[in-house]
């Protein structure tokens, strides 16, 4: 990267990054060795794997059961044999240890991730992560609105209350990772920012289950993203740039320097990668950064900041290209081979 002339440094959530490429939450960011490899390859920041609400709540329930059970068998155990929950992080010890190690060993910002859907007490772990040195928290809201009695307003309000709850727990930056399935994604993005989100990560991938015809089980089926998946994100970042008062992070489908360039041009502050890094390894970061820098160099850009948003909806000559006109043109442009 020493021969790159374009300044790739950027700002995300108020954090200074050496470049806009971020390793998003995945198994690759779950070990110190791979985190160090990503750092050495040149990544701008890392997002640790999510600490799940279910994990914290489940382990807390087990702890509570044993505390009550053991205490009841000995009259000398007036307060129970176990420390109070306020002093004991049953579901997050290893996660907090990883957070501490990453902050000690890495040279780039470390973003913690919380994954959940409720306003329960598990959200206080955001404060614990801040206390262990997290540079920011990414709230990964993974809620499938499957209840037919739940209205769209109720779903949206649930998101907003959760963001407000986590925002009240921390003073460090807060990013919110959401899916695209809202009636008005741009309006929801604006409301999330008003609720306390400093940044929005677009979009969460809702993994789809499969059916095992031999066992008749509903089986998990994880497939890595492909470059086609980036188009939904590209459209909505282009629409939101300049209209939503929040940092915008693009995730899903970016596998190479070309994809990263496109996301920056439509307005992404950072570009997140997981599937490509899982497929090709941490060294792929250096390849993507080299291609990214070369593209901007060849076109004499002084910095990525200069290029950012130059092809957003508010900047292009034909804003309707990101809306219905694009749909009409796409349909009419297809010519099947005969």
Image (cartoon, rainbow, N blue to C red):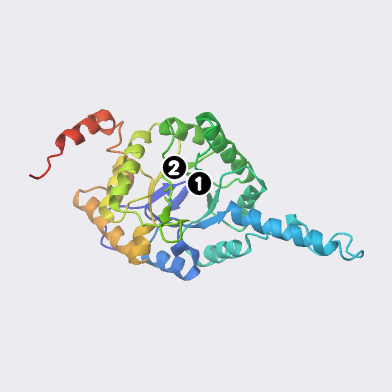
Vertical placement of residue 48 versus 105, above or below: above
Residue 289: horizontal and vertical position, in percent?
30, 58
Quarter location, residue 247: top left
- CA distance for labels 2 and 1: 8 Å
Residue nearer the viewer, 82 or 58: 58
Residue pictured at 55% horizontal, 36% vertical: 160
* Residue receiving disc 1: 142
Tag shown at residue 220: none
Residue nearer the viewer, 175 or 107: 175
Residue pictured at 65% horizontal, 45% vertical: 120
View extreme (right): residue = 75
View extreme (bottom): residue = 33
Residue pictured at 58% horizontal, 57% vertical: 133
Q: Residues within 10 Å of mark 1 (few under 14, many from 20)?
A: some
Residue 227: horizontal and vertical position, in percent?
29, 52
Residue 156: horizontal and vertical position, in percent?
52, 33
C-beta proximity under 8 Å, tags 2 and 1: yes
Q: Residues within 10 Å of mark 2 (few under 14, many from 20)?
A: some
User: In this image, 140 relative to 165: left or right?
Assistant: left
* Residue receiving disc 2: 179
């Amino acid at each position: 990267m020493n021969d790159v002339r374009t300044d790739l440094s950027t700002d995300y959530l108020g954090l200074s990054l050496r470049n806009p490429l971020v390793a998003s939450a995945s198994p690759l960011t779950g070990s110190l060795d791979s985190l160090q490899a990503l750092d050495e390859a040149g990544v701008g920041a890392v997002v640790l794997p999510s600490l799940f609400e279910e994990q914290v709540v489940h382990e807390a329930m087990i702890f509570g059961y044993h505390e009550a059970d053991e205490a009841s068998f000995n009259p000398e155990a007036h307060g129970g044999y176990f420390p109070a929950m306020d002093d004991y992080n049953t579901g997050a010890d290893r996660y907090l240890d990883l957070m501490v190690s990453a902050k000690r060993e890495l040279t780039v910002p470390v973003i913690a991730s919380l994954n959940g859907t409720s306003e329960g007490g598990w959200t206080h772990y955001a404060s614990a992560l801040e206390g262990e040195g997290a540079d920011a928290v990414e709230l990964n809201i993974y809620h499938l609105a499957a209840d037919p009695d739940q209205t769209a307003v109720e779903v949206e309000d649930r998101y907003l209350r959760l963001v407000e709850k986590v925002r009240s727990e921390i003073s460090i930056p807060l990013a919110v990772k959401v899916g695209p399935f809202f009636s008005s994604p741009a309006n929801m993005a604006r409301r999330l920012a008003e609720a306390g989100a400093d940044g929005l990560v677009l979009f969460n991938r809702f993994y789809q289950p499969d059916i095992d015809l031999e066992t008749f089980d509903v089986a998990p089926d994880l497939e890595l993203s492909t470059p086609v998946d980036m188009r939904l994100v590209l459209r909505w970042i282009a629409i939101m740039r300049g209209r939503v008062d929040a940092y915008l992070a693009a995730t899903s489908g970016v596998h190479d320097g070309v994809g990263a360039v496109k996301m920056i041009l439509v307005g992404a502050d950072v570009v997140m990668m997981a599937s490509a890094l899982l497929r090709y390894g941490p060294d792929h970061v250096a390849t993507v950064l080299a291609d990214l820098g070369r593209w901007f160099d060849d076109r004499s850009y002084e910095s990525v900041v200069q290029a950012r948003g130059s092809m957003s909806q508010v900047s292009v000559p034909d804003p309707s290209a990101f809306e219905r006109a694009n749909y009409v043109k796409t349909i009419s442009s297809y010519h099947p081979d005969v």
